[in-house]
Amino acid sequence: MTRAEQYRNLASEVRTRAAKEASPILKAEWRLLAENYVRLAEQSEATSRQGAVYDPILDEILKN
C-alpha cells in the first residue's frame, strides 16, 4: 500500500468517526482532519510523480 493510499484510508476512517460524532464542534474538527489527510495523499502522489522518494515517516523509523 502506498503512502497516498494510507492517507486516503485514514481520511475515510476519520470521516466515519465524524459521521458518528454528536458534538458539532468535534464533527467539524474530524472533518478538517480528514481534509488534511486528503491533502497529504495528494502531496504524496505529486511527490511520487516527480520521482522524489522523501518519506518523513519512513525516514523517522530508519533513524531509530
Image (cartoon, rainbow, N blue to C red):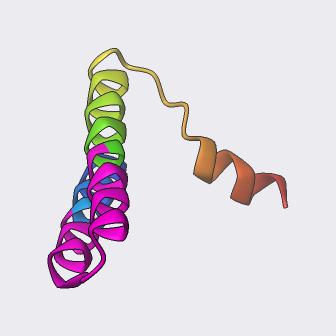
Of residues 52 and 22, the one nearer the viewer is 22
Work out whether 53 lies above or below 60. above
In the displayed structure, does residue 53 sit left or right of residue 39?
Answer: right
Residue in view at x 37 percent, y 23 percent:
47
Residue in view at x 29 percent, y 42 percent:
41
User: Which x, y percent locates residue 5?
Assistant: 24, 55
Magenta stretch mostly in which secondary structure? Answer: helix
Work out whether 6 lies above or below 51. below
Work out whether 11 lies above or below 22. above
Provide the residue span drawn in magenta: 12-35
In the displayed structure, does residue 63 sit left or right of residue 25?
Answer: right
The answer to which image quadrant residue 27 occupies is: bottom left
The answer to which image quadrant residue 14 occupies is: bottom left
Of residues 18 and 13, the one nearer the viewer is 18
In the displayed structure, does residue 25 sit left or right of residue 17?
Answer: right
Q: Quadrant of the C terminus?
A: bottom right
Of residues 29 and 34, the one nearer the viewer is 29
- Point out the residue furthest to the top here: 50
Residue in view at x 54 percent, y 40 percent:
55
User: Which x, y percent locates residue 49?
Assistant: 26, 21
- Point out the residue furthest to the front here: 24
Residue in view at x 23 percent, y 56 percent:
8
- Point out the residue furthest to the right here: 64
